[in-house]
Amino acid sequence: MRYEMRFSGVGGQGNMLAAMIVSEAAIYFGNKHACYVPTYTSQVRGGPTKADIIISDAPILYSEANNIDYFMSLHPKTYKMYKSDSKQGSIIVVDMNMVQVTEEDKKNFRVYELPIVETARNKVGNVITANIVSLGITAKLIDAVSEEGLLKAVERRVPPKFLELNRKAFEIGMSLVK
Amino acid sequence: MKRTVVANGNEMVVEGAIDAGCRFFAGYPITPSSEIAEGMAKRLPKIGGVFLQMEDEIASVACAIGGSLGGKKSMTASSGPGISLKQEGIGLACMAEIPLVIINVMRGGPSTGLPTRIAQADVMQARWGTHGDHPVVAICPATVKECYTETIRAFNIAEELRTPVYVLTDAFLAHLSEKVELPDGKELKIVNRKRPSVKPEDYYPYDTGFGDVPPIADYFSGYRFHVTGLNHDKTGFPDINPVLQESEEERLINKVLRRQEKIATYENYKIEDADIVIVAYGSNALGAKEAVDSARKAGIKAGLFRPITIWPFPSIALQQVAASAKHIIVTEVNLGQMVYEIERIILGGRAVTEIKNGNLIFDTRHPRSSADLTTVLQANGTPIRPNQILSRIKEVA
């Protein structure tokens, strides 16, 4: 088993943290090999960010994802920049209010267009939980880590004060995938 | 007991330094090395060590040299422009023979360049960055685990040789996070500097009567120790006697060269029957390994030679591998730096073993290689992908 993933967006959205949580879920709660490679720019907030995760039964050598099974994007700029490494037929999840997916992409990939940031703001009640909403969606869509393991990995990372808020974000995220 | 951790390259450098006995760090934060300063700031005060953030990189390397003179294993860390600023201090540590570890998390350049992106373009700076003839040791870890083990080795070499040692990582490895199994603390080999065994009145800080690496006294321990960047005699005070200075300059270079077989470590991967030999170092070697695996699956006899220490370069080991190879492919994340050294080593068939009375002494046991030499180079801020190396393997196969 080898599963390659990429989370992308702009600095401040929490995409790198989301990706780190996925890799930790695979290691701590899935007993898998996993690596996590974040990249950002000197612009920090508002600059393009991407984070790659590879989950595998075998040790991983080269750790940048370049044959991607699952791509999440919360920004049109990074959607265009980082989509090209996705496999034919792979999963692409975008925030439907930010990223416009072309008809061609819809043919080539299994595209999920979901209101991620809007859900975080209006249904969870805090826009900064958008990355955890993303993780709820991810939990529902992938088999490389379990739903339970991913939630545990979220709980491991968030401050106790915000535990309930993040659990709620995760669950609402899961419910977005029909 | 073995420990399993999930950490990135920068965090493992910190753990390696702490376990090697580093108790003094002076630095100035810069991307992508900042987590090293952050980690040392968190860890050192809890274990009786000192962390100092100085006003700039020049001050921080000077401060780390001071820490080492005070008897503490010392380290500084930086990247790109910060390493350029540290060059003067590194020369002082070479000349005054002060153990010091310098971490350079390589990023794109020149100038501020690509602060958050991978490069391996400081390998020649590590060799020749500070002015004057000087010894250098530089180590290039390839994995997160090696960021730990090779940082420990860097301290050991610095202590044993009384000289600065570079650890060259890169922006990719610094932030790559994975599961790492660390060795049992009891299994670690830790080297401590040789301190004087004579009474203070009989001590000279550069007394070669005790060998080519004279014992070093801690400041404020009652031993007289004058430190200068000027050429000096055994007392540490300035001297311009050409006979003494020639032998002293040569001693500085030779203390590394004469130990190169021990220091210049490397890895041979699927090399025994390889017609095509990839030479790669640092994190770039992992992509090269994947390319070798793919080539082998396609029935191509490819292998990897990976210098772990790049200065001194494991020349003889490379010559042995190159002697039977048909093609050598050098890959590095820059526009051609180590390739010139590699070309000299394999095509020239010579390896320097020491310098004696102005003569370079060569080991000429190994024939010149007749292998064809090509490169896979890239300096765009992204890592070289296994496919790029595999394509070149297939081209030459």
Image (tube, coloured by chain):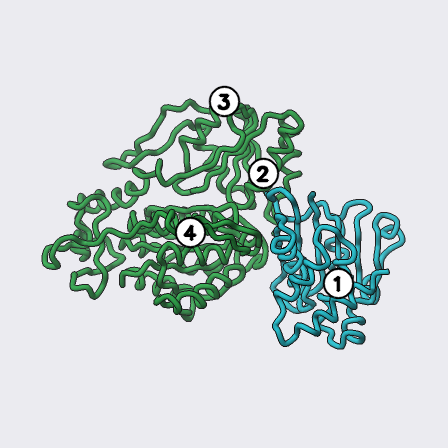
Chain colours: A cyan, B green
Labels 4, 3: front one:
4
Query: Which kind of residue does numbered mark 3 sit on?
Result: Ser
Read off the residue under disc 2.
B288
Q: Are marks 2 and 1 in contact (CB under 8 Å)?
A: no
Query: Which kind of residue does numbered mark 1 sit on?
Result: Gly
Which percent across, then down, holds residue B225?
19, 60
- For residue B41, side relative to residue B111 (left or right): left
Label 4: element kind:
helix
Read off the residue under disc 1.
A136
Q: Tell me the distance, in whole angstroms, between the alpha carbons under discs 4 and 1.
A: 39 Å
Q: Tell me the distance, in whole angstroms, between the alpha carbons under discs 2 and 4.
A: 23 Å
Residue A13's quadrant in the figure?
A: bottom right
- For residue B235, side relative to residue B146 (left or right): left
- Mark 4 vs 3, N-terminal side: 4
Query: Which kind of residue does numbered mark 4 sit on?
Result: Thr
Give the number of the disc on residue B377.
Answer: none
Label 1: element kind:
helix
Which percent across, then down, holds residue B259?
31, 39
Give the number of the disc on residue B151.
Answer: 4
Quarter that holds the C terminus of chain B: top right
Query: Which kind of residue does numbered mark 2 sit on?
Result: Ala
